[in-house]
Amino acid sequence: MSDTPVRPGRPSVRKLPQFPSAVRGLSPASALRLSPPSDTWFKPALSVVVASAVPHLTLLALGRLDLAVYSMAGSLCALYGHGLPYARRARALAGVVLGMAAGLAVSLVTASLTGSTAVLIAVGALLAAVQKVLCDATRIGPPGHVIFTFVSSAALFAPQRLDQIPGHLALTLGAGAFAWLVALAPALVRREGPERRAVARALEAAAVCAADPGPRSGNAVDPGPRNGNAVDPGPRNRRAAAAAVHAAWRCLLASGRPTPVRRSLERLVVQAEAAFAAPGPGAGAADPERLRAWAARTRGRGPVPMSPPAPGTADELYGIDAERAVLRAREGRRAARRALLRRLGPGSPLLPVAVRTLFGCALAGYLCAALGVGRPYWAIVTAASLYQANLTLSWNRALQRTLGNLLGVLVFAAVLPVSRIGPLALVCCCLFFGFAAEALITRNYWLGSVAVTPMALLVLEFGGAHPAGELIGDRVLDTVLGAAAGFLAATLVTNRRAAGRVERALDATDRARAAAERTGADPAAAPAERDRARRTLTASLVELREAGDTAAGEWWQRALPEQRLLAAERAGHRTLAATAQRRGPTAHAPSIGAE
């Protein structure tokens, strides 16, 4: 069920608004190509099955399976937060459950007060836009806003009375609380599991970078394919390693107080950081085989490997502790809130995406209603699911969603007789497709949609049997019209703020690079300050690449500063390499065991 983002196969920066250059990115073959499964696909899959099974079976025993649609709204919250450390996950999932209940409450109250399809569609489109912006601003991650929109849109078109709403919301909150417990239960067995996986990914990415760092001339950025020639993968490897190391530091900083295991993990991230900042085959920290071996042991269930201290390790860990203290202090929390408000402010690049979502969902809903679909909520959900970081990715998602839904309708037609054997068979079918959706969706969104579609249709059976032909016909019409209307809205509502985000990211990168060079050259600067400046530069380079990739996939906007972007990335990576080489003598602090 996860709305896993689809990354472009080969990110590049192109000058816009030349229409043909954008068209070249709309490749159906690349949009439908399967990827290796996620290394954690089974976690959301098992979590949602357990979180759904208990409420479903309880309602089945009570003879009130018709209420399962409300408990399912809370159970689906178990899909979120699996990449977060458990302390952060607890807070994030609590927000997800409350947000799900709030959206459902608005829908139920609206449905109880009016039967006007026009009003219901307008409210559904507005909710979808708000949910999209909030999920993007908070960066909650997969499955993003689609689950919220699915629940709230479906509830808009369900018969409802005001006196029923408190009980239905209580079911959602109860199931959501159980989903919260399910998602946090692994902490009892392996409380540093998310941190270990994040560090293992950083080590693996650093190993790839160390094995193939690219030319040593300082050309640390891949400008993309030129005239069909092959592109050296080294710069891409370095960018991937920088992103993975940045994600590992963020995970460790958000994990709470240091423990022996986390301290060992921090030492490993220092090793990964040194490998990508100044890559080169050889022995020691930049040896790819050693990094891969550390990654395998870190990902496993045994003790975290005890790496030899890299130069400046003790100073780096001191700086991490100081940074963690700042983030946990009152002023650090205020800064985080201010950053969130900036992402939601009037100048936010998320605003055009919100307008796309509002316009596309409303257009899809009204088109389906005009053609006689009584409950056009699936068209709203289809349109809402298309909106990704840019227009190119939205086009890919439109292809994936359409293909997956149409194939999923065929699967539903085949499994419907089995689900109608009895209530228990219906519950088992829903649980099976919930697991299958998470097992498949990380391979490609269209493959996961093949399982999501029959599950969504089977949920309607909880309230009673529906004519199969009507369900299938409405779903096909909703899918086609929703995808067409959603993508039309994406092309008409341009995102000219994407180029502005690149400009801001360039300025931030320049400032971070200057600060890193200044502190690195200052003999009086504290080692912790130098390490913090280097991490800030790494974060700014990650943001710059993300902003550039997003803008490169948009149509009809002002030309991007391509040469400045490439030069900023090259200069940033050169500075990282220089500061890594000037980290000072090896710290002889003892390595700390893991278990």
Image (cartoon, grey):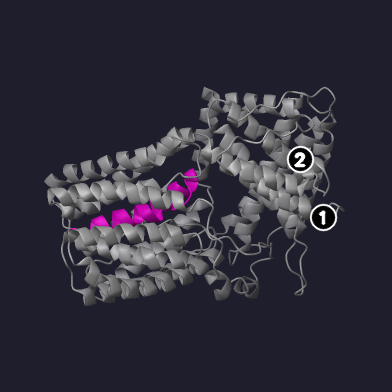
Local crowd size for mark 2, using a 10 Å CA cut-off: few (<14), some (14–19), many (≥20): many
The answer to whether mark 2 and mark 1 are in CB contact below 8 A is no
Local crowd size for mark 1, using a 10 Å CA cut-off: few (<14), some (14–19), many (≥20): some
**Residue at the extreme right of the image, as rendered:** 217
Q: Quadrant of the C terminus?
A: top right
Q: Quadrant of the N terminus?
A: bottom left
Which residue has dot 2 on it? 274
**Residue at the extreme front of the image, as rendered:** 302
Which residue has dot 1 on it? 219
Q: Earlier in the sequence, mark 2 or mark 1?
A: 1
Magenta residues, as a range? 129-158
Q: Nearer the viewer, residue 279 or 519?
A: 279
Q: Nearer the viewer, residue 575 or 188?
A: 188
The amino acid on which the numbered mark 2 sits, given as a three-letter code, is Ala
Query: Which residue is depicted at the point 23% across and 51% down?
Result: 56
Query: Which residue is depicted at the point 77% across and 29% down?
Result: 312
Q: Label 2 to label 1, Cα distance in Å? A: 18 Å
Does any portion of residue 106 appear in the rendered image? no
The reply to whether the magenta stretch includes residue 144 is yes
Which SS does the magenta portion mostly show?
Answer: helix
In this rendering, the answer to whether 171 lies above or below 233 is: above
Residue 259 placement (x, y as % from top left):
57, 26
